[in-house]
Amino acid sequence: MSDAHAARRERLREHCGAVGADAALITSAANVRYLTGCAPCGATLLLTRERALLALPADLPPDDTGEHPYADDLAHLAAAPDEDTAATATAAALTLGVGHLVVEDHDLTVSRHRALSAQAAGVRFSDLDFAVERQRVIKDEYEIGDLRIAAEIADQALGELLESILVGRTERHLAMELERRMIDHGADRAAFPVSVGTGSHSGRAGHPPTDRRVEEGDFLTVSLGAQYRGYAVSTARTFVIGAAPATWQVELHRLVFEAQRAGREALGPGVPAAAADRAARDILQAAGHLESPPRPLGHGVGLEVREAPRLGPADMGKLDNRVPVTVGPGVHLPGKGGVRIEDTLVVRPLEEGGPELLTITTKELLAL
Amino acid sequence: MSDAHAARRERLREHCGAVGADAALITSAANVRYLTGCAPCGATLLLTRERALLALPADLPPDDTGEHPYADDLAHLAAAPDEDTAATATAAALTLGVGHLVVEDHDLTVSRHRALSAQAAGVRFSDLDFAVERQRVIKDEYEIGDLRIAAEIADQALGELLESILVGRTERHLAMELERRMIDHGADRAAFPVSVGTGSHSGRAGHPPTDRRVEEGDFLTVSLGAQYRGYAVSTARTFVIGAAPATWQVELHRLVFEAQRAGREALGPGVPAAAADRAARDILQAAGHLESPPRPLGHGVGLEVREAPRLGPADMGKLDNRVPVTVGPGVHLPGKGGVRIEDTLVVRPLEEGGPELLTITTKELLAL
């Protein structure tokens, strides 16, 4: 893996060369992890033409995976107590004669940026402008391997839940249990707060679990994601409680299922990012379900659970091979409930079998 | 409560007047909550001399407490889809003729600040410089009431854990159970990831729970905090597993207990913030326990689980009446384990009985 990280740093060096910078100062936690493989909270990476230096907080909290807190093949510096690691790294840049430093304007606060500029008065600062985020969009096979494991963990947790008794339990308890099961199966953590919505809460995106109990006849929407070695996936399913779903439930589930399938099938290298959203939205709109404002169908996943690209009606750009995205349409009927179905898939060309489905739990309308 | 929020906004208006600003743009989530009572993710408050306007995200996620997403006594604006609420609020400031706007440089990223400055080219921007954070240090009785409930919740969860069988269970499971119990007792959430360390992991601050199982003879350190209506407390206790603690365990526990008591007793209005740290540290150092770098004894709590003031050896300033702080010394002997004992207390004058202990679980060395 350290070869992969070195290759990623080399690509960032090429970017720095292209914009005339001597070095990059990386403060975004996801970007530091991407470029070094390590995730200590508050670390800063200084990448010059020849060197990669990791500045670590004085009072280094343990890594969230419980693993080695820093990559042992990387030179590192310890910040003084209370010192910002970005200041430690900037001091090193000064020592190394850096004259033009690119920094992450979207991550640094105005206060931190001001302090660094004052510290390095002779140095020119410019904005890295999401160069690392752009680099992160297309995943290598190491990353896809971690995403696959994250998806397996979420699927296992969900599968176990489906085998248990659900009637009478609260949304909160089901959400906690799913989180616990993901951690039992090896997740670093839940990638986002697990959402469980039953009855009139079903089908709502990001519904925070309440004390409402699961009842016979309810729709039950479960939305969960595991994070494994930093990589996050997201999935959602909707089931019905009891033996006989109502006609409206069967029809609404079929509609969202069709929309989600159309979205999945529209994914491919070279396809506009908005195409999958359109494919799914057309089906829902034809049935009279208009969302206002429209919620994008999906988004990229990786070291952040929501990253580029976005799959919304107004999103420009085309998808690339090896880009993992979520596809998750939903319909919520106020007071009644609804359906949400979401997968994480990796964009692949047709020659390789088309989109690779990572979250493989069945999308049928199971009656539990 | 809305009177209390209005009074807080009035104090901020006074600050704006004193620095010659026409309005303040508040983007920090904790500060927005403090000034309005509402906690929608991504909201921005514009406070002018006459008005308080809350800009809300277009796709407003539900409030994390599941309660009303915004204060209904406050005027509010909805951002356009994908629009930064700070931009929405800045547009309103322009309409209202604001010429000098104070913003939170410690919260705004360089990118956001640049976008706002470009949007409001004729407006002077200056830094609010933690004015709201300074205002938040001394709590009113509404806030202390919420902190008291948060402490009760943490105590209840801990008390229930002590009644259960512990031997053979993993740190991870105990941590998950404590979190679940806090939520069952009404917490919004855990104020920070629950830390459970057994055996050689005991006594470590912020130890992330592992799959290590509790064994006979172990020290067991549990560190947890509840968040209630946004207000967070923090507490830690160390117990011993099995009937007969070893002599070193009894002695180490007594030492940390004495240090923690000395720290608590040193709290008072007008007392230097460093005094409690010194009182506790002197006792640990006299017994040969030196920390390098020194970890501060404690810190303020409130809408953030770690806020001003800090109680470290080098911290200046004096404590005030009605400032809630943590007092939590610890000793960790590598390979062997250790003890950490932490409370949340409110600084009160001697006439009112001295520091008010919020986290009341016993600090004896219980053999479980």
Image (cartoon, coloured by chain):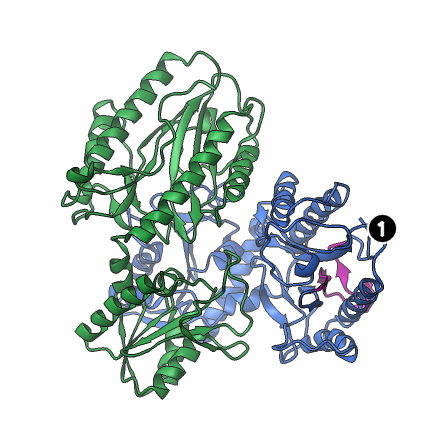
Chain colours: A blue, B green
Q: Position of residue B312 (x, y in %)?
A: 24, 42
| A333 and A40: which is toward the camera | A333
Residue at 58% from the left image edge and 23% from the top image edge = B168
Depth order, front residue of B43/A170: A170
Relative vertical location of residue B258 with respect to residue A334 in this rendering, above or below: above
What is the x, y in percent for residue B310?
A: 26, 47
Is residue A126 in sight in this rendering?
no
The residue labelled by disc 1 is A243
Asked if the stretch drawn in magenta spans residue A341, the answer is yes
Q: Residue A264 in the image: state x and y as whole percent.
A: 76, 67
Q: Nearer the viewer, residue B45 or B329?
A: B45
User: Horizontal and vertical percent for residue A143?
Assistant: 63, 55
Left or right: residue B63 compared with residue B274 = right
Q: Residue at x 80, y 65 (%)?
A: A257
Disc 1 residue crowd, few under 14, some 14–19, many 20+, Cα 10 Å: few
Q: Quadrant of residue B256?
A: top left
The chain identifier of the residue carrying mark 1 reads: A
Q: Amino acid at mark 1?
A: Ala
* Quadrant of image for the N terminus of chain B: bottom left
Residue at horizontal 23 percent and vertical 38 percent from the top: B355
The magenta span reads A336-360
